[in-house]
């Protein structure tokens, strides 16, 4: 395990919570306004939620609205605003076309120079049937990513994940062992799963990986008819909630002292205690007669 935290590093983070709709241009306009609000509040790192630019379930409309990364107008707009504001801007994800029949659910970390510093394609696809009748088949439209990513920032390693990845703790453990001190979880959790699991899963990943967790979320009733949970949140390596939003669009701020990562890992050095093991399934045996 390596620790890529910069000694004495401190950061003011701003999470942008949105209720994205079915029109890319309108979503970009809304996102840029909130990004500017975050920068005005002193945020040096600003994160937007999953599918910042488009919340769409209809396949035909989805593909008609999505562009490849090359020449992507929304991405160019975000690069321009990051440069103008001099911030690290993390676009939680944009649906980008990668083949004629598949998209990537792709995160972009943009530097203050307006350059793409890192990109990450969501690895775990949200294919679920919920008890309330909601059904999602993300794999029908999206190609799953195959590479975990840690981005270098002025404050330390930033592990990139997206939404449903949150349910796979081995990914977060690997990012922590790879040198992450910050973990990003931009999301669009459904209201149903959010009410049941959002806080528990995020706090668990922070505690297990002993990293700060930053999770910008979609929240509210969307044009396509589905609801998301909101509650964008920043959590410490000890599992403390440092800041949390509600269900409406806005910005959530927290001041982060990266020195806490080393303190927590020294207090409970669980990342150094991983051990390999074998797994055995043992058959039931009859009780020994006395």
Image: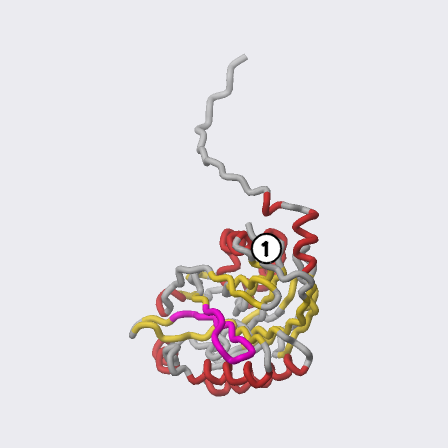
* Residue where numbered disc 1 is placed: 3
Q: Residue furthest left?
A: 100
At x 55%, y 71%, the residue is 228
The span shown in magenta is 104-119
Per the picture, the main secondary structure of the magenta-coloured stretch is strand
In the picture, the quarter occupied by the C terminus is: top right
Q: Position of residue 256 (x, y in %)?
A: 68, 66
Left or right, 280 with respect to 249, comes to: left
The answer to which of 31 and 43 lies nearer the viewer is 43
Q: Position of residue 100 (x, y in %)?
A: 29, 74
At x 49%, y 55%, the residue is 171
Left or right, 70 with respect to 216, comes to: left
Q: Position of residue 45 (x, y in %)?
A: 61, 73
Describe the colour scheme in one phrase: secondary structure
Quarter assignment of residue 37: bottom right
The answer to which of 208 and 217 lies nearer the viewer is 208
């Amino acid at each position: 395990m390596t620790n890529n935290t910069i000694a004495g590093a401190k950061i003011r983070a701003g999470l942008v919570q949105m209720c994205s709709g079915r029109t890319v241009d309108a979503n970009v306009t809304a996102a840029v306004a909130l990004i500017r609000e975050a920068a005005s509040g002193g945020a040096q790192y600003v994160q937007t939620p999953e599918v910042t630019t488009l919340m769409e379930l209809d396949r035909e409309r989805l593909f008609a609205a999505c562009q490849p990364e090359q020449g992507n107008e929304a991405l160019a707009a975000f690069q321009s605003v990051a440069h103008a504001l001099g911030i690290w801007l993390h676009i939680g994800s944009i649906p980008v076309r990668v083949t004629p029949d598949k998209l990537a659910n792709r995160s972009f970390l943009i530097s203050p120079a307006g350059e793409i510093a890192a990109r990450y394609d969501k690895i775990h696809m949200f294919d679920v049937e919920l008890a309330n009748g909601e059904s999602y088949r993300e794999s029908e439209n999206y190609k799953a990513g195959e590479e975990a990513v840690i981005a270098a920032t002025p404050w330390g390693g930033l592990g990139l994940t997206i939404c449903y990845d949150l349910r796979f703790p081995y990914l977060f453990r690997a990012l922590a062992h790879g040198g992450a001190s910050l973990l990003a979880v931009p999301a669009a959790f459904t209201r149903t799963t959010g009410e049941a699991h959002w806080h528990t899963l995020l706090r668990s990943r922070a505690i297990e990986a002993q990293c700060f967790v930053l999770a910008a979320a979609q929240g509210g009733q969307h044009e396509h008819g589905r609801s998301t949970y909101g509650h964008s949140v920043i959590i410490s390596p000890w599992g403390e909630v440092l800041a949390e939003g509600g269900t409406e669009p806005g910005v959530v701020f927290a001041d982060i002292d990266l020195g806490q990562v080393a303190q927590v890992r020294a207090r409970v050095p669980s990342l150094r205690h991983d051990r390999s093991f074998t797994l055995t399934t043992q058959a039931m045996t009859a009780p020994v007669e006395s």
